[in-house]
Amino acid sequence: MIAILAGIVGSVLGLGGGIIVTPALTLLFGVDINHAIGASIISVIATSSGSAVAYIRDRITNLRVGMFLEIATTVGAITGAFIGALIAPRILYIIFAILLLYSAYAMIKKGKQEVPENVPLHPVAEKLRLQGEYYDKALGKTVAYNVDRVYEGFGVMYGAGVISGLLGIGSGSFKVMAMDVFMKMPLKVSSATSNFMMGVTAAASAGIYLLRGDIIPIISAPVALGVLIGATVGARLMQRMKSKTIRKLFIPVMVYVAFQMIYQGWRG
């Protein structure tokens, strides 16, 4: 039941479900943290698989933006793995916590805005054809959108990759933030594209966790099954929800993750 809930939340908000799976397994079921993280990686792949089919079919996912930003995340993750000994993790925790709190504030300021308006098309976005359109079932119309501030979005994604590689944490909230707050894309597109990206990233790292012996089938299999069911339901729910409703759900999650990071930085 917890895995189904994680799948629904992960699919709607573009966070992958790991934010619920890992604490639930460790705190409620007493699972070893390494095995919980292994199951969480599998849950992210399941969330992405369950929701990506619906989002790509309905053309909500922006594949070009996803693959473009995936470059930044991957390079950032490699950088993070290399510079682990050079930078104090507590500093990074606090920097990214402040960035998340700023983004939560920016989302609150957007208030009841359904889709971004009067967004200019960035020259790089025009060259790479990153702009797009999708049919919004909640609004009952086709929404065309531009992509702005490509460099800022790319920079945030690089930073998210660094912190993922350095601290071993997921970066779903940063992916959505980069697209929604910085690149001014519609929230639904940001969430759907984040789901797609996280599946690619998780699939790449799952092999390492498997070789380490951190993926225990008896734990991961029921989690993956529940998350897959939840993600399929979540994908249908998200398309019928208004962006302002999704934003109201997303802001508390961002604030929670930010305070968790401040706590880790303060303690570390």
Image (cartoon, rainbow, N blue to C red):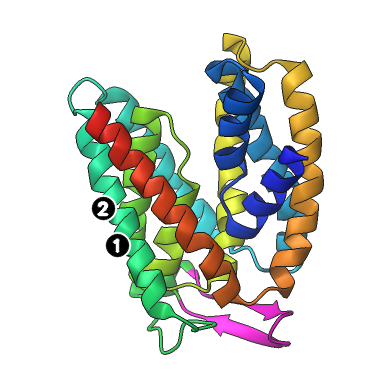
Viewer-proximal residue among 59 and 228? 228
Q: Quadrant of residue 192?
A: bottom right
* For the residues bearing labels 2 and 1, Cβ distance under 8 angstroms: yes
Q: Is residue 119 left or right of residue 34?
A: left
Q: Residue beneath label 2, please? A: 98
Give SS at disc 2.
helix
Q: Residue beneath label 1, please? A: 102
Residue 130 is a magenta residue:
yes
Instruction: Give the residue type at disc 1.
Output: Tyr
| Image location (x, y in percent) of residue 142 | 67, 85
Q: Quadrant of residue 181?
A: bottom left
44 in relation to 214, above or below: below
| Image location (x, y in percent) of residue 69 | 45, 53
Task: Give the class, few, some or many, for how many residues have Cα within 10 Å of label 2's Cα (few <14, many ≥20).
Answer: some
Q: Quadrant of the C terminus?
A: top left
Q: Residue at x 34, y 68 (%)?
A: 105
Q: From mark 2 to mark 1, how far is it between C-alphas? A: 6 Å
Viewer-proximal residue among 11 and 32? 32
Q: Is residue 30 left or right of residue 87?
A: right
Q: Residue at x 78, y 64 (%)?
A: 236
Quick one: which residue is furthest to the front in this view? Answer: 28
| Image location (x, y in percent) of residue 186 | 52, 74
Write down the region rendered in magenta.
129-146
Give SS at disc 1.
helix
